[in-house]
Image: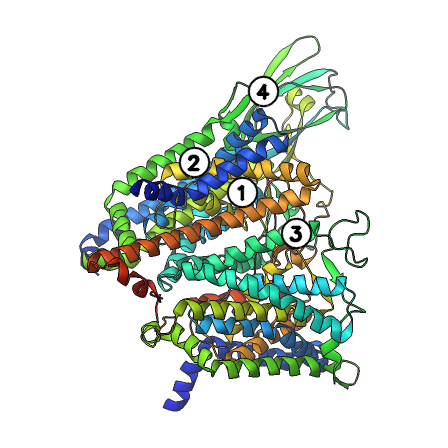
Amino acid sequence: MSDAVVKGKRSPRRLLVRLGLVAVYIFAVGLVFVLGKGHTLIVDNKDAADASYKADDGITVSIDRAEGLELYKGDRVLAKLKGQEHSVTVEKIDGEKKQYRIKLPLTEDLLILSVPKLMAGIEPAVEVFVNVQEAPKGDEVGNSNAFTSPGGDTGPAGEAPTQPPSP
Amino acid sequence: MSENKSIGRFFTENAVVIVFVLVTVAAIPSSGLSIQYIVQEMITRLGRNTFLVLALLLPIYAGMGLNFGMTLGAMSGQVGLILAINWNVAGVEGLVFAALVGTPISVLMGYVTGFVLNKAKGREMVTGYMLAFFINGIYQLVVLYMMGFIFPIRSPAILLSRGYGIRNTLNLEGVRQSLDDALMLKAGGFAIPIATFLVIIALCLFVIWFKKTKLGQDMRAVGHDMTVADAAGVPVDRTRIIAIIISTVLACYGQIIFLQNMGNMATYNAHDQTSFFAVAAILVGGASVKKATIPNVFIGVILLHVLFVVTPRAGQNLFGSAMIGEYFRQFIGYGVIALSLVLYAWRSRQDAIRAREGLRGVTAAAKPALSEGGAK
Amino acid sequence: MNKIKQYVTDFGWPRIIIFIFLVLLFVAAPFVKVRIDASISDVLNRFGQNALFVLAMVPMIQAGCGLNFGLSVGIIAGLIGSTLSVQFGLTEAFGFFGAVVLSIPFAVVFGWFYGKLLNKVKGEEMTIAMYVGFAGVMFMCIMWLILPYNGPTMIWGYAGKGLRTTITIEGFYRHFLNDFLAIRIGNSFVFPTGMLLFVGFAAFLMWLFMRTKTGTALTAVGSNPDYARASGVSADRMRTISVVLSTVLGAIGIVVYQQSYGFIQLYTAPLDMPFTAVAAILIGGASVNKASMVNVLVGAFLFQGLLTMTPSVINSTLQTDISEVVRIIVSNGIIIYALTRKTKVTK
């Protein structure tokens, strides 16, 4: 093949281009990973156990530009976020508004934000939430028919009809 | 005389489209669905499926027939999504992440497919079909047994309760509709996912541009006649492999787009019907095994999916059974592929016979003896 | 040394690998508490069940029509025959032979049309065969729901309309062949003499047919079309005959399968069966355009052996059900290997 001769001539340049592409690829993967990393934030409005801070009643918390979440004393609300840096705007029941910034650790999925702590300026306001629940059960692999026999066990599916003929 | 012939030819060349339009038009009233609903479904399904169907264009262009091996690209995209969900990468970024992760896998898959298909010249479609099932086995081996066991999986929520293997249905909550919602236009009572359509249009432009490049021209030459292309210095085998690789990578992205719209992934079944739907769509749109254009893709997706939306309801209303509508849908789907393939094969034989006769300057009397037997 | 080398290449590496794998499974079986006698019995049973399907591949391969992925057409004819047999309440010999006799006319008609279709598309038979088969099965799915069957064991209990997915033939012709002259050793070993005799007889008949004038003409059309044409043989006619023959064998095959399995399986069950038959004959060493009785028997045995032994042994070893995945990989890998071989008579 005529490729061989051409390859020899352009070899160093080709290698460089290829390495460059790999570098771009790795960078791109890292970029979207960091930008898109999802976190579940539990917004918490509880008093401290040792009374070092108290929770305000009837506050409205809005994260970034989302709708405000109303929290009474002792409430906890879930918020799903994307990315690591967020602005938290707290509006007290008397109308007083204040904006805070929080930074979430990249590798943690489930975190808890104690709003009273945040308002009192006690660090750290955001902590890792230790979840003691089990992973959800159900939805087993079940009968081995599912992915081999061509619609052996079928059912009119909603979107895409089943019965793939699969040997 | 010749007028009848050309009308006849028009019908055979567009038979599939005609049959489809007729059946669809007949079924719409009996389905009891409103035009509003049908149009919205059409818009949604166009956004969801077009990318996958576009992936079929290049292999047809390069003379390799219908790329049933696109399933491999779909599986790669699914692996990408599994990892995206595993590491909790959300939104459009999650989709890009899945696409980036899926790309090297689908390039490898495409290379394997192209390599195998080159060894089965003349039988590409059957081989591609079987290869999809073979790799499905490997996919299951990896996803059902190795993930969580050899490959560490971070989110226990996506594993089966036995501790390893991904669950049957994966909730794509983090990335659900993220491409669609990115630029959703609500107009005239319809919701139109502009971002998705922009991506589709970008692909169309890519295909148009690609056909003008040297590589694209090489593919056209190979598709036209492999021996002539080889004589002209075109690296036939390599060009074919590249066509399949591109197709597989596009199928990977297309499957990601498909799944983000669905919102849920049937881990072990989602890719099974991918090639069936895409092939049926492009054939319904008027394409053949040797020739396919971009309009074929859009027309096909619209026709096929309108029929798929309408027939189950029509079947239910007419026969009182949802199952019959469902089976009817499948029957039409498989039937149309069979019909298209038959028409194409029959037509190309007729063309070959006519060409041979033209060369020989044969009289009408001697025709029957020559068309007997035929090449094998 | 050369002779051994020649034999190996002739036999084909995949077959050797599978044979060794099968032997290993049998050796490993007792170590993982899998009973050998039950296993052999199972293998023989499944071999007999599927042998006719594999045999059905031969006529079309020899005539150059490729692998019959559209075997579903024949199976459907067989299903019509067997459902009619149960509907009419035929039992034992009448049940079995009744089913066969009722299927044949359907099989001939279906096969004839199917053959005419394939003649129009020389060169792309296999893909089209597949989709014609699928479309046919789906069409029959609709038919099973609306045809006026009313045998009490056959229809859905509640709705009362349409056939059940699985219909038992217990009390009709279940194990009719299997039990005929069966040899029982101990608790777990049954040698299904009747069925194996039937299969052997069918293979013998096929072997004879291939040596008749029609049979040789058929082979000529497949291996050397120009010579056939020159000898005045009509390729189209031979090909149609091969398709009809294949379809009829498919119909009889499903009846044999049913009597061994114990149930009539309707709806989407026939979708899968052509593929297992194709894999089996390819494992047996056949190619896309050449197949012999040896290929049929060896292939069916090896393939069913694999299907029987892999689940029991590997599952016992790994304590998990990995068998389906292994089966998918092996059977499809074989088909792909066969499809990528260079053949002398190309398309």
Amino acid at circle 4: Tyr
State the CA–CA distance, disc 1 to disc 3: 45 Å
Q: Which mark is residue B37?
A: none
Residue carrying label 3:
C143
The circle on residue B298 is 2
Instruction: Look at label 1 and name its amino acid.
Output: Ala
Q: Which residue is mark 1?
A: B84
Frontmost residue, A41 versus C164: C164
Secondary structure beneath dot 4 equals strand
Q: Are marks 2 and 3 on the same chain?
A: no
Q: Looking at the image, which residue is at 32% across and 51% down?
A: B62
Q: Picture quarter containing residue A9?
A: bottom left
Q: CA distance from mark 2 to mark 1?
A: 30 Å
Q: Tell me, yes or no, whether dots 2 and 4 are on the same chain.
A: no
Circle 2 or circle 3, nearest the eye? 3
Q: Is residue A111 left or right of residue B338?
A: right
Q: Amino acid at mark 2?
A: Phe
- Secondary structure at numbered mark 3: helix
Residue B110 appears at what percent x and percent y? 40, 54
